[in-house]
Amino acid sequence: MSDLDELYREVLLNHYRSPRNAGHVDGATHAADGANPLCGDEVHLELALDADGRIADIAFSGHGCSISQASSSLMTEHVKGRDAGAAFASVADFQRMMVEGNPPPDADFGDLEALAGVAKFPVRVKCASLAWKTLEQALRDGRLAHAAVTTDERSQ
Ligand code: ZN
């Protein structure tokens, strides 16, 4: 195993053992559930868009394999504070990385690059992609009925 592989492995284990943004969001405006039956991964995602369409807060819960949990943690860390349009672009960049095995050059992925190697294992791609597909669903169709915040539809 190369030094880089070892480093990536440690990033993923760290996020699996100490997930960032685990739990729930007070005053969530959007939510979605995702499942990957092939592996048994399940994720519930909640987020709060502010009046500018920015993801002010995001949290996930659920259970699954280390790849799905680490990806959920890394995803929430990456998109928190970004606007919905940028989050959609990140989802597209992530899916591209799952096909090409490398992060798009302008993606600014940081620790998310630790998941690039998953592209070599098609079965695990579904594990890594689950949180991202759920994010897309939450932003697109997951608006909660009680949510009072008005979002900028142009960014979606
Ligand atoms: Zn899995």
Image (spheres, rainbow, N blue to C red):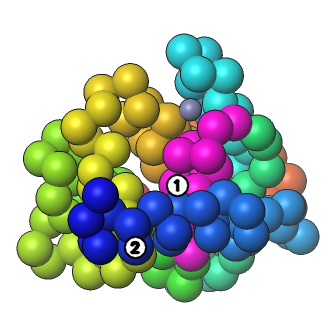
Magenta region = 64-77
* Magenta-drawn stretch contains 76: yes
Q: Tell me the residue at 60%/16% (across/down).
A: 37
Could you tell me which secondary element the residue under label 2 belongs to? helix
Q: Quadrant of the C terminus?
A: bottom left
Q: Is residue 83 left or right of residue 77?
A: left
Front residue of 15/133: it is 15
Residue at (85% x, 61% y) in the render:
23
Q: Give residue 13's quadrant in the image.
A: bottom right
Which quadrant contains ligand 1? Answer: top right
Disc number at residue 89? none
- Residue extending furthest toward the top: 38
| Kind of residue at disc 2 | Leu
**Dot 2, how many residues are within 10 Å of its Cα: few (below 14), some (14-19), or many (20+)?**
few
Asked if residue 155 can be seen in this view, the reply is no
Give x and y (percent) for residue 19: 71, 66
Q: Position of residue 75 (x, y in %)?
A: 51, 63
Locate residue 129 relative to residue 64 in the image: left or right. Answer: left
Please provide percent x and percent y for residue 106.
14, 77
The location of residue 91, given as percent across then percent down, is: 35, 55
Residue carrying label 2: 7
SS at mark 1 in the image: helix
Q: Nearer the viewer, residue 69 or 96?
A: 69
Residue denoted by label 1: 71
